[in-house]
Amino acid sequence: MLYRYFVLMIGASALLIGVQIPNFVTQYQQRLDAQLTEALVYYVQFEEIAEQYFDGDMQALIRKHETSTEDVFRAEARPLRELVERVARFRYQQAQLDTSYPEQIWFIATQADPELRASTWRMYSFNVPLTQQAVITGALFALLLVLLLDCCGGLLKACVHRLRRPKRQRR
């Protein structure tokens, strides 16, 4: 009896955790969009310079900074390169998140920008959204966790039962 209450409590907790997944995906996407928008404010200005002097080749602009005789321009090369890489990384992530919901979850779990994922988690706003997607995700998460718990409990019971049988009966 107590075991069933424990399983119900685990299931309810898993349901509440599961409904957070779509919310986390949304908050990650919003944070990614904000970071990309901020980076593009500066990127666009350098892109215009590259367009004017290097036919739009940002790498040529960076090389020009790196090989400049002026210390100040050589010093600008590293932040400029980092900005270009950051914009490319954020655009790639946006493209990866423009997929189906399960693919979005998998991408965030396995390939998301660690810094962005950590800041999303740090600033995460918990709520219980009652969207269809959240309820289905929560229910599936709860079902999988309860099934896993029941399987582990069954295996443990079988092992204990086998160990308690007298040695003569084991043969």
Image: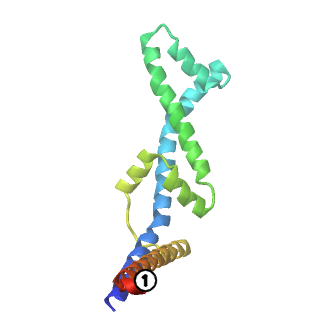
In the image shown, does 158 or 89 lie closer to the viewer?
158
In the image shown, does 58 or 145 lie closer to the viewer?
145
In the image shown, does 11 or 57 lie closer to the viewer?
11
Residue at 60% x, 27% y: name it: 48
Asked where in the image residue 7 lies, by quadrant, the reply is: bottom left
Where residue 165 sits in the image (x, y, percent)? 37, 86
Residue furthest top as drawn: 69
For badge 1, the amino acid type reads Arg
The residue that disc 1 covers is: 170
Residue furthest bottom as drawn: 1
Residue at 46% x, 78% y: name it: 151
Mark 1 nearby-residue class (10 Å; few <14, some 14–19, many ≥20)? few
Query: As displayed, is residue 69 above or below residue 73?
Result: above
Residue furthest left as drawn: 2
Evaluate whether residue 30 shows in this view: yes
Query: As displayed, is residue 155 above or below residue 114?
Result: below
Query: As displayed, is residue 116 above or below residue 73?
Result: below
Question: Is 49 left, or right, of 165 in this rendering?
Answer: right
Colour mapping used in the image = rainbow
Q: Secondary structure at mark 1?
A: helix
